[in-house]
Image (tube, coloured by chain):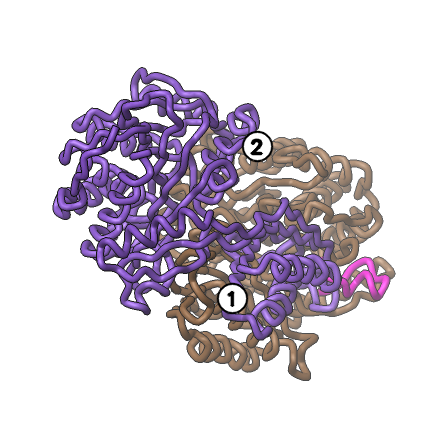
Chain colours: A brown, B purple
Amino acid sequence: MKQRAVSAEGNVDPDRLWARHMELATVGGLANGGVDRQALTPEEAHARKMVIAWAQVIDLAPAIDPVGNLFLRYEGRRPNARPVLAGSHLDTQPCGGRFDGVYGVLAVLEAMTALRGAGWEPERPMDLVVWTNEEGCRFAPTTMGSSAFAGALSVDEVLAIRDETGVSVAEALDIVAEILGPMPSRSLGFPVHSFLEIHIEQGPVLEAHGCPVGVVTGVQGLRWFSIDVCGQSGHAGTTPERHRRDALVTALRILDVLREHMLGGTDHQDVRFTVGRFEVFPGAPNTIPGRVRFTIDLRHPDVDRLDELGAIILDTCERFAEPCAVSVEAPPASPSIRFAESMVGLLDNAARAECIQPVHLMSGATHDAKWLSTVAPTGMLFVPCGGGISHNEAETAELDDLVAGTRVMCRALRELSAA
Amino acid sequence: MKQRAVSAEGNVDPDRLWARHMELATVGGLANGGVDRQALTPEEAHARKMVIAWAQVIDLAPAIDPVGNLFLRYEGRRPNARPVLAGSHLDTQPCGGRFDGVYGVLAVLEAMTALRGAGWEPERPMDLVVWTNEEGCRFAPTTMGSSAFAGALSVDEVLAIRDETGVSVAEALDIVAEILGPMPSRSLGFPVHSFLEIHIEQGPVLEAHGCPVGVVTGVQGLRWFSIDVCGQSGHAGTTPERHRRDALVTALRILDVLREHMLGGTDHQDVRFTVGRFEVFPGAPNTIPGRVRFTIDLRHPDVDRLDELGAIILDTCERFAEPCAVSVEAPPASPSIRFAESMVGLLDNAARAECIQPVHLMSGATHDAKWLSTVAPTGMLFVPCGGGISHNEAETAELDDLVAGTRVMCRALRELSAA
């Protein structure tokens, strides 16, 4: 049966799209305009509840899987066909912005609303999906819900993860369930036709090119390291330098050497080297630090070079440990991935149909799309954000760009769900 | 009237002295043998209660002043004569040891017990004193009780100081008062004849000389700085190095330059440069730090050089702030002080009477004696501690040295209270 051609993207409503961003930003809103809405908190549950209510206006049916991933279904003519999934996340960093994740949910909702308005009847179902705990701040690891969906974590493993106050994911999910009320359940990792995600770039490339929509070709590799420096605390006033085993001094020396290595190479523009968590104990002004714990977040588009730089971290921590003891935990690397050529092509065409010459670029950040790409053809779009700034209350985006991305998403959803 | 000569120091009881240290160490005791008994906590109140009970065995009468300094009086023939004060403190660092402060209280208690046992009747009263909040970890500043006693802080100022959880000194004192029960009150800063303090050295000098007791000639100058580095948080995976305003990177560069300056001079053995508190925000592994706050504890025996080094800190923070904004708070310096020659001589003689050739040395640490030296002739004794280590659970001291110091204290108390 032949589909009737519809021009749904003309129904995308800029005012509604913007107003919903602003309304969601009040849930966990910070005084300076940012948002603190960490994963599986009552705030995140309330944000989900708002999205569910908006989705029900266009008859999307909610369901939830065992790790809390939320699906809002746009039914197709073949209800049992593998669905097209599209979405992102509603959780934020502790000092996050109004667009990271949220835009990926609201753009798909707006695209589906536009499609519904145009009377679009897809062949296969589409699910707007809200992944659980993309940020990984409250519960580690990041992209928890999508990695479980892709089979990289078991349900039991996920439910047992605890936040710093000792609350488990299982306990947090119970609280979320109470706020959301009863809802049909979905199995974890059901078969998927394809996945689409749209997100603010969180970097400066699109803005620099004056390009409203970019097509993401893959996600750069990532390694996390946890480093523990054990020295000896002592009295700040009495202990001469040569008798000190100051854990902070050792940590500073290691970081000095590492920054030389990481940013001194010819590929320094490709390296992302970040020490984001850095804790000093006991933390009294007049006591020499006896212990320092810090994290390294290391990314590089080339997987071999990422391995090489990772080895330098391990080696440097060993060589510059004296007079302290230094131990390094290095969980398995998250390697670089490339999205399917077919999906890159489909998104490129959808953008060109909107008269956009899309920049093709790698993602520096990890996204849920990375996990989905291991189970289904996956494509991803970026829109610019102001100054490339995100993970920050000052995160901004231009409405024109948000609308352009939503229209491209709308075209792509129609294309994928038509067959 | 002529005093009867008594040989009280022979009554000093090593077993009792040690047992009381070990008993006090159980109050706030840590699993590894250290102690966490911060100022004006219920634990510190219970430690005071134990000392009061031991003092009452020899009829010392307790009284407390408005900032919680505790006085245990050994009456003299002239009850209205200005008293000899002697003591130290019972609060500890968060990961403190069993001797810092405690020894100064228990040695004086043991010395007074020995004097009482010998039937010593002093002319002027003696007060065993327990100063409030010497460590300054829970409530800033350090040596809070003695500085208030010396008039450097008003009662109202002290009572309004709050800890990190928002509890004020006034509120904490109420809880302490409840645990201690009703007690006569003393006015703040009453006239004092003289002050004696004995303490573990917290440094390596006496141990290196094999000397059981040292006479402290003064306290080296101290400056504290609070430095606030404001950058911009951002996404670790996407933000290229040249676009970053990473507050941690700026803080590291400043510390690098400062350590060069501080420890690169010919007087590097005299400089004590410590960054004890170092906090990084927001503290997520995948977020570039937007803010770092750290403290510098700077000490030098030469007051002019201390000023010079302080100016270098201010200058360096300004010169290396880019691309962040750096602000520095520098409270008034605590200058070097010298103890009265008469007291140094009296303690030297008392040590020699015990057949000890005392090393004379400056104190690297600040002590309550520093404040008392501004209102009365003040003297101070040190005994060695193992490896010079303190502000650490591993702090140790030899009983022979503790006893030797107590015997010298006993002689000095007798001498000062006789006239």
* Number of marks present in the image shown: 2
Q: Could you tell me which chain the residue with mark 2 belongs to? A: A
B25 relative to A334, above or below: above
Q: Residue at x 72, y 45 (%)?
A: A120
User: Can you give x and y, in whole percent of width and height, for residue B380 in the image?
Assistant: 38, 48
Q: Residue at x 61, y 72 (%)?
A: B260
* Label 2 close to label 1 by CB (< 8 Å): no
Residue type, mark 2 in image: His
Locate the C terminus of chain A and report the quarter of the image it occupies: bottom right
Q: Which mark is residue B270?
A: 1
Instruction: State yes or no: residue A212 in magenta.
Output: yes
Task: Say whether residue B47 is visible.
Answer: yes
Q: Could you tell me which chain the residue with mark 1 belongs to? A: B
Q: Classify residue A311 as left or right of residue A220.
A: left
User: Can you give x and y, in whole percent of width and height, for residue A352 in the image?
Assistant: 82, 63
SS label for mark 2: helix
Q: What residue occupies the far bottom of the structure in this picture?
A: A266
Q: Residues within 10 Å of mark 2 (few under 14, many from 20)?
A: some
Question: Is circle 2 on the same chain as circle 1?
Answer: no
Q: Classify residue B71 as left or right of residue A21.
A: left
Residue type, mark 1 in image: Asp
Q: Which mark is residue A46?
A: 2
Name the quadrant containing residue A201: bottom right
Name the quadrant containing residue B240: bottom right
Q: Give the range drawn in magenta.
A: A201-215
User: Can you give x and y, in whole percent of width and height, for residue B354 in the image?
Assistant: 22, 54
